[in-house]
Image (cartoon, rainbow, N blue to C red):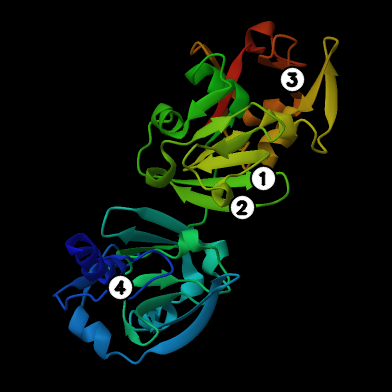
Amino acid sequence: MKKLLLVLILFPLMLAGCNGEGNNAVEVAEEEWTFELILPSQEKIELAAEWLLEQETVEREVTPGEDDHRIYSGILLSTLLADYDLKQKELESIRCIAGDGYIVNIPDYIFQDREVLLALYRSGERLGSREYPVRVVIPEEELMYWVQNCVRLELEIRAQPPEQVSTVYILEALLRKINPPGQKVKVQDLVAHLGLDEVTLHFTAIDGLEKAEHFSDIKNTYISLEGPDAPYLGGEDLHAGRKVKELSHIQIGDNMLLAWSTWQNMDFATRQIEGQTGIALDELLLAAGLSLEGSLDLVAADGFSREIEGLDTEKGILRQQDDGHFRVHFEHLSRMFHIQEIVKIEFFD
């Protein structure tokens, strides 16, 4: 009887302590906290709880699941940005950091045409302990982007790729050089090989999809040449919505990485030199954004290189050999310029 009485007393307490996605009933002690906003200029704005809770709020009824209806109220990000002369559509990404260290990078195609609500209340009451102090809510978007327990937002302005490409790599040859036989290479190894660090990677797929990812968010992912979706950006911890299938090219700084499997099927002229047929080298390099108004370095996997003039490419071809390696040929230059196992072509004044 005593045991039964104890269970009856504890059971309501146990229920009060549960706080899953569907339960927001846990009371939260009013404690001092600040919400950090990192502007694109890297200026850190600390927004005190007292100030945030005094702002005028908007209310949104959302339905994350078929039988899950919620009412959140808080401050629209667009309203908050207006105080700093920023517009939501100008942002390239919103990096959300939770109190437990969980990080989600929200790309622009997710929030561009949607409201982003910094929710402070649920059903008229302060958020429960799982969501407190702020929850990011994006109506009509999947829950992975609804970051709960959010304490910090880092904003990045839309960064356009450099206008001038200085180096063109053949992606397949580069991956083979970094990690033979080159079927899969980690992004952190790829970026390190290029001598870069904290950069933004711009991905373009065959279907025209374009997206940017900051290195720190995807350094443990990989570029793979295996499978029907190759080449692709993937990773065990990378959400399906952030994977990029059938890559056309990747731009990292002023480096353009061309996927040969894609580019060889583009509408480039072909030429035949010494019985070998290949893609017109000048057309390919111009399409990649490389200037031909200067000198170029042809560089092989072992570091061997030869300098040519940009205009020499008008009589050159690039082709893939039967062994999978790449080679350039020229009509008017000696065979010492017909570089085998070529990896990159670099412009210099």
For badge 4, the amino acid type reads Gly
Q: Are marks 3 and 2 in contact (CB under 8 Å)?
A: no
10 Å neighbourhood of mark 1: few (<14), some, or many (≥20)?
Answer: some
| Distance CA(mark 2)–CA(mark 1) | 7 Å
For badge 1, the amino acid type reads Ala
Q: Residue at x 33, y 53 (%)?
A: 102
| Distance CA(mark 1)–CA(mark 4) | 41 Å
For badge 3, the amino acid type reads Arg
Q: Are marks 4 and 3 in contact (CB under 8 Å)?
A: no
The image quadrant that residue 36 belongs to is bottom left
Q: Circle 3 sits on which residue?
A: 319
Dot placed on the residue nearer the N-terminal end, 1 or 4: 4
Q: Are marks 2 and 1 in contact (CB under 8 Å)?
A: yes
Q: Circle 4 sits on which residue?
A: 128
| Distance CA(mark 4)–CA(mark 3) | 61 Å
User: Is 124 placed above or below 262 here?
Assistant: below
- Left or right of residue 218, residue 1 in this image: left
The disc label shown at residue 210, or none = 2
| Distance CA(mark 4)–CA(mark 2) | 37 Å
Q: Position of residue 295 (x, y in %)?
A: 56, 29
- Left or right of residue 58, residue 312 in this image: right
In this view, which residue lies farthest toward the left? Answer: 32
Q: Residue at x 32, y 72 (%)?
A: 134
Dot placed on the residue nearer the N-terminal end, 2 or 1: 1
Q: Secondary structure at mark 2?
A: strand
Q: Would you say residue 45 is visible in this rendering? A: no
Rendered-image quadrant of the N terminus: bottom left
Q: Are marks 1 and 3 in contact (CB under 8 Å)?
A: no
The disc label shown at residue 205, or none = 1
